[in-house]
Image (tube, rainbow, N blue to C red):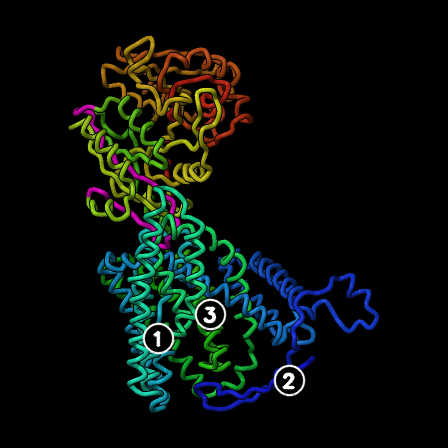
Amino acid sequence: MANGNSSSYTTGMEGTKRSEEICLKFPPNVISPGLAALLAQKDKHEKLMDYSGPRLHFQMVVIFVLTQIIHSLLKKLGLPLFISQLLAGILLSPMVFSDQHSLVNISEESVAVLGTVGAFGFVFFLFLSGVKMDLSLTLKSGKKAICIGLLTVVVPLVSCMTTIKLLHEEGNEFSNKSFFLAVTYSGTSFPVIHCLLSDLKILNSELGRLGLSAALIGDMLTLFLTVFSLWVKTGFEKGRKEALIDFGLAMLFIVIVVFVLRPAMKWMVKRTPEAGQIKDTCFYLVILAFMMSPRFTDLFRIYFLYGPFIFGLAVPDGPPLGSALVEKLDPVISGLFLPIFATTCGLRFDLSYFKNSNLFAYHQVLGAMVALIIKFGVSLLVPILCKMPTRDSLALAFIMISKGIVEMGSYSIMNDNRVISEDIFAHMTIVIILVASIVPILVKRLYDPSRKYLCFQKRTIMNSRLNQELRLIVCVHVPGNVNSIINQLNASCPTRESSIALDVLHLIKLSGQATPLFIAHDKQKKTLSSKSYSENVVVAFEQFERDNWGAVSVTVFTAVSPPNLMYEDICNLAMDRLTSFILLPFHRRWYIDGSIESEDQTVRTLNFDILERAPCSVGILVEGRRNLKGSGIRDPLSSDNSSFYNIAVIFLGGQDDREALALAKRISQDKSVRLTVIHLKAANSLGVILTENDRMLDSAVLNDVKQSVCFTYIEEHVNDGPETSNFLQSIVEDYQLIIVGRRYKTEDPQTLGLQEWCEFQEIGIIGDLLSSADFIRNYSLLIVQQQQQRTV
């Protein structure tokens, strides 16, 4: 039956009362009898959309389709997906379609169901945001980040309150309400800034790390001020005694979370085997505690949204618990429930409220704009005073004022609870749309991390003298990379006269955390005991340094970052350490019978990124095929036929081949290494695309090889790719290491016909041929690319 329910409430700040009558059907229809049954009924008194289940499904489909259509048009302008979700809600709102003609049947009943689903997603989002945050990083933030984080909240807050006080004389109501609103206008949202930096792919850049640290400080201060403003409001409205009770209950809640729940979750983590997955029972217990947290916050008189967030902060970040929660829940929340919430926020927007705005609303909006401008000014001034470049300071200022789903959700909930009126909500929605649209475009224009590589020229092995220390970076993804790299470095026989400054970078996927980490283990030994990052890697390479004392100096670093942004850590380290050569492991490893042992496409993507962006020369190491019962490559000096370590360089010409030859010359300085240079010349010079300058440089380096008694020079004339393949098959078994140039997008007569069969473009045509299944091999393969010349 239909039941009319009339309710009267106060709109909040204005003090005016409004009565509305809402008619709902009880009991509600949830599941339809089916489309066929509805079509078969005679009186047609029921429709499919009268049932909340089918209506919700249809609304979700319409929201998804409309959001994707809008985003396909706006993403070319650089606008984030959040804007498309918000605009989809505005287009579906009663402002565009009346209640009777709305595309998704917008009514009080349908909005209640859709809003509940969206609010569920927002609560989960706040919980996962807390899980990803590591509060210990607030203690490790630099002075610059702390100053920016604190000042960008405090100074705008004071400016906003002063502006509103001057414009609106309101007595106690100023203390009760405006301080709380001023905090929301001036606050910083860590999840919003994290999403912005992730979308712009500058999360682990220098500017991104500074912005994240400042946002973390600002978010914690905002949280404290918000809770404090609620206590102040309670004190004015109910008396000091009630405010003190609220304060005591809040402290009790935090004590329970910190000293009961967090130790319990740490105990779960300790019981999980190393590199293992958390037990399902523990996982579900954490989810159950999260689901109960809003109820507990009511009992402890804390704002209900803070319970899930605070509980998320108590969850140990990273693997195994934090990463399991994020990996299992984040795709569903971010891909389904949170977009619905953003759209329902847009459904609340109505331009008609602008016409009925009162003076108080205009004063609040003006105060919010003052807070935004002052926040931008402080974010710009502090970095400039710290000698940061102007463009980077401007980019950071725009990052710190960014708005997103957290602010939109806060204003929507305040609007629903009548803390703010509809006109204030409409004004703030416009502000959020404008800021969230402009900020990503301007930051992308102002800040380009690759620009700094332009001045980083001539960092190659060819430009390094033979008796000069070689600065080298090796990257490690899995434990198997450690053995292969150490074996290869041992094979190069480093000496005191030709020493190596080795930087080892252990790359770990960022999981269950929001903030990337970069750890220098020689400076932060304590990190090993707390997080045990890279312990085995550190121990292995320290032993390698002791075995080659005086010839090798090792520094181990750990980078915990998203896989698609790991190249930033590698390139930044190469610039800071003045590196000449980066050694990367190949993404695939084989057993001796040719079957694939392991393969990681994210490593392959990373290798491509480094080859395109590296500020120095790059090498990719393809391991020899491993024995099924063994682990690692055989000792290079234990060849069956010789005590020498035989290296071959396949030389066709060009800068990459010259760089490969320079590396081989450096390795072959030891007497136990024999170097053979195999020059593949085209039998017919027609079609050779080398420039005159390349031919002159090739002749110069080859003349040095021919005149040297330390090297073996072989010249072979071939007509095409098949002849090259046949020749290489006949000689590769004589060598333990083969070095080739990448020669990307270069096809000469010597490789004619091989390009179409090339599977791995990142190692070039010859590299792909030598790593293919046609070559039964036990040799390692090193593909070299010389530093690419960059222009502005």
Name the image quarter holding the N terminus: bottom right
Residue 267 at x, y percent in the picture: 32, 52
The secondary structure type at the circle numbered 3 is helix
Q: Earlier in the sequence, mark 2 or mark 3?
A: 2
- Is disc 1 placed on a helix, strand or loop? helix
Q: Looking at this view, is 65 or 327 the one in front?
A: 327
In the picture, the disc for residue 408 is 3
Which amino acid type is marked by label 3?
Met
Q: Quadrant of residue 214?
A: bottom left
Q: Which residue is drawn at 25% across and 63% down?
A: 146
Question: Which comes before the other along the chain, label 3 or label 1?
Answer: 1
Up the image or down, 508 lies above or below 656; here it is: below
Q: Mark 1 packing: few (<14 Cα in 10 Å), some, or many (20+)?
A: many
From the image, tell me which residue sits under label 2. 4
Q: Does the magenta run of residues contain 349?
A: no
**Residue 397, relative to residue 748: is it above or below?**
below
**Three-letter amino acid code at disc 2?**
Gly
Secondary structure at badge 2 equals strand
